[in-house]
Image (cartoon, rainbow, N blue to C red):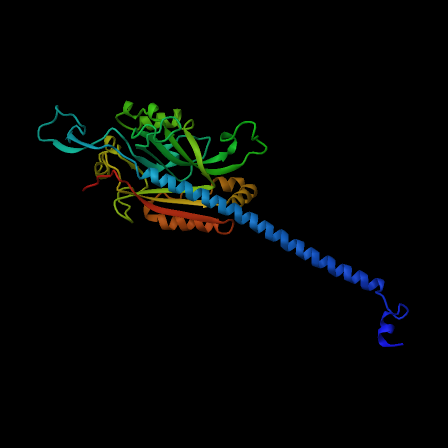
Amino acid sequence: MNRWQEAVNPETVRGYTLLELLAAMATLGVILALLFSATGMTSLAWRENASAIDTFQQARSAFSGMTLRLGRATLNNYRDYFDTEQRDFTYPIFTPGKMEYRQRSELNFVCGRAGDLIADETTPHPAHAVFFQAPLGRNGTSEGSGRSALNQCAYYIEYGSDEKWQPSFAVSAATARYRYRLCEAVQSSEKFSLYQYPAGNLWLKDFVSGQLSSCAHVLAENIVALVLLPQRYPGDTGIAPNYAYDSRAWQSSRTTLADLTQNRLPPLVQVTMVVVDENSARRMQTADPGGFSNLVGSGLFQNAANYAVDLKTLEDALKPHCRYRIFQTTVALASSSWSE
C-alpha cells in the first residue's frame, strides 16, 4: 500500500476530540465577541461624531445668519440742533449759547446682559442679548417682501424645555428635552411700533412682554453662551466696559460715555458663541440638571476687561465633560457713522 492510499484509508484517519472542538468553539466565540464589540464601539463613535458634526454645522449656519443681520443694524441718523442745557432736541426753542449740532435718531441699539434686558424670572436667559432695527423688509414670514422696510430684531439664548417650541402632540413633560437655544426674534414691518416710544426703553419692555415670544424662533440648539462686545476698534473696551451699550443712554444719564454713544451705532461688535454637541448636552443635563442650567455663571462676562479670563473659565468647565466649539468674529456695522 502506497502513502496516498494510507492517507485516505478511513481506518488510519484520526478525527478531532471533543476537547479540541470545545476549545475551537470557545476561541471562535471570543473572536466574534471582540469583533462585535469593536463594531459596536465604531458604530457608537460614528453616531456621536455625526451628531456633533450636525450640531456644529447648525450652529455655524445660525452664527453666519445672525452676524449678517447684525451688520445691517441701523439708526437712520440725521443732524439736528441739541440744547446742552435742556439736554434735548428742542429747536426752535433753545437756551442761548447752549446749542450744538448733534446726531439724532428715533431708533435704538441696545445690548447687554440678557437677564437685564429680558425680564422673565421663569426662563433663564444666560450671557448677552442684542436688540436693534434693520431694513430686512420682512412682512409676516417673508423676508425682503417689504423691500427696505424696518424690522425690530433680537438675538438671545434661552434655556428650557422644548415643549414651548414643539406641537403639543409631539412632546410631553415626560419626554421634554431641556436645552440651551439661540433664538431670533424679528417683528414684521406692519407691527413696527418703536416710533410710539421716542424716549427711553419703553419700546423694549413692550416688545419683550408683548411680542417677543410670538415672533421668536429657534436658530440652533446647544448654544450655551452668546457674548457681545461693542467696540470702536478691535480690542477696545472703552464704550462698553460692562458689555452694555444703549444709544439712548444719554436721555437718562449725564456721563461722558452716554454723550459719546448718543444716537450712535458702535463701529464694531465682537461676537462670540459657544456651542456643545447634543450627546454632551444630554449627558450633562441627565447627570446634573441644576449645574447644566447654570453653566454660564452670573459672574462670567460682566467686565469686558476680563473677557479672555472668563472665556477660559468657561472652557475649563466644559473640557472634562463635552465636545464644544467657539465661534468668534468681529462684525462691522455698515451704518455706523462714529466720530470723536
Report the quarter where the N terminus lies: bottom right
Q: Quadrant of residue 67?
A: top left
Q: Position of residue 209 (x, y in %)?
A: 39, 26
Q: Quadrant of residue 102?
A: top left
Q: Quadrant of residue 244?
A: top left
Residue drawn at x 27%, y 47% is 236
* Residue 92 vs residue 290, the one in the foreground: 92
* Residue 60 vs residue 205, the one in the foreground: 60
Q: Position of residue 295 (x, y in %)?
A: 47, 43
Q: Position of residue 322 (x, y in %)?
A: 51, 49
Q: Residue most toward the bottom?
A: 2
Residue drawn at x 35%, y 47% is 329
* Residue 306 vs residue 107, the one in the foreground: 107
Q: Position of residue 165 (x, y in %)?
A: 49, 31
Please say whether residue 10 is visible from this viewpoint: yes
- Give the left or right position of residue 189, taking residue 14 as reference: left
Q: Relative to 64, does residue 150 appear above or below in the rendering? A: above
- Numbered label tally: 0
Please say whether residue 296 is visible from this viewpoint: no
Report the quarter where the C terminus lies: top left
